[in-house]
Amino acid sequence: MFKTAFIFPGQGSQYSGMGKDLAETFAVARHLFEEADDALGFKLSALCFSGSDDDLKLTANTQPAILTTSIAVLKVAQQETGLKADYLAGHSLGEYSALVCSGAISFADAVRTVRARGTYMQEAVPVGTGTMAAILGVERDLLEDICREATEGDVVSSANYNSPGQIVIAGSVSAVSRAIEIAKSRGFRKAMLLPVSAPFHCALMKPAAEKLATVLDSIYYSDMILPVVSNVEATAYCDKGRVRDLLVSQVCAPVLWEQSVVAMAALGVTKFIELGPGKVLSGLVKRISKEVEVGSIEDCAGIKAAAI
């Protein structure tokens, strides 16, 4: 039997104007943005609809903005189309959107939690001392060897396994720079620093994980109505008792996105639908699996196209 997965984007997919036409057209989306404003105590909706790129790039803003837009898209898609999911997954921050969709976490709790998560991740490492880089065309085992060689007492490790031949590393600026030079010396010329504000998904994020654990201890977890494929393990789970620990681990652990898509395909998923701003994950899925159908919904045009 053919199965469908809803997938939710992470940081980097934000843009000014996201969610605006949905909120203007559909009451369910408008109410969702109003709920986010109330939960956070400021106009997140204005930031999404007309905020500057610089403000949207601030991690503490980016995370609740993308989550809110993603859930607004989800709510409208559920109301206006016949689309249903069998599995859920999200890239880093997107895992929170998947958990809201599963029923494990309320939207209000999720938006407050990711606001704190973004703040803690930014505070964990002084600006300018940590970074991330994409290394293209290198195999996982070889890149891990490169990172070990580049460490020299600093931190550098794999942070995102995005698709075949696209792995992101994170760590201190000096160690990441050494890893880039080592990779280039071994023939991997496509190695570049990324324009990020912190080295996400590596050991330098431990202070953020510890603070986030306290926030996650304070929220209520409900039974999951759909299984979520976790970033940390790349396996589907439906036990609400595991949510908190997996989200804490996710802060420092690499995002196993390629492995997650492969796992869902093995479970019978033949259609992946990205819900939220941008089409980053849709592009990655196409590179991971040529056999599956891929779609995305982020605005009214996408809703209209998906309506059955």
Image: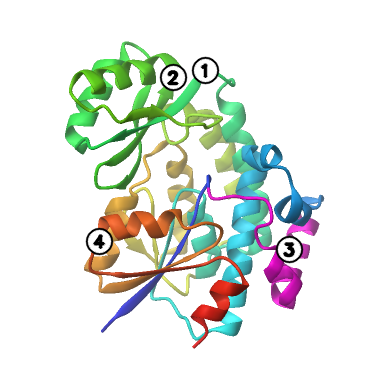
User: What separation in Å lies between label 3 and label 4 (alpha carbons)?
Assistant: 34 Å
Tag 3 and tag 1, C-beta contact below 8 Å: no
Identify the residue shown where x is 30% and y is 20%: 179
Q: Which mark is residue 129?
A: 1
Q: Which of marks 4 and 1 is nearer the N terminus?
A: 1
The dominant secondary structure in magenta is helix
Residue type marked 3: Phe
Whether 305 is among the magenta residues is no
Q: Name the residue under label 4.
A: 289
Specify which label sits upstream in the sequence, 3 or 4: 3
Q: Which image quadrant for residue 2?
A: bottom left
Q: Residue furthest bottom?
A: 308
Distance from Cα at disc 2 to Cα at disc 4 = 33 Å
Asked if residue 18 lies in the magenta stretch, the reply is: yes
Relative horizontal placement of residue 264, taking residue 15 as reference (left or right): left
How many residues crowd mark 1 within 10 Å: few (<14), some (14–19), many (20+)? few
- Which residue sits at x=28%, y=55%? 287
Q: Are marks 2 and 1 in contact (CB under 8 Å)?
A: yes
Query: Which of pointers 4 and 1 indicates the residue nearer the eye?
Result: 4
What is the x, y in percent for residue 5?
Answer: 39, 70
* Kind of residue at disc 1: Thr
As measured in the structure, the alpha-carbon distance from the residue carrying label 3 to the one carrying label 1 is 35 Å
Element type at marker 2? strand
Vertical relation: 3 (above or below) 92: below
For marks 3 and 1, the one nearer the N-term is: 3
Q: Give the range drawn in magenta.
A: 13-39
Position of the N terminus, as image quadrant, is bottom left
* Element carrying mark 4: loop
Sequence-wise, which precedes: disc 2 or disc 4?
2
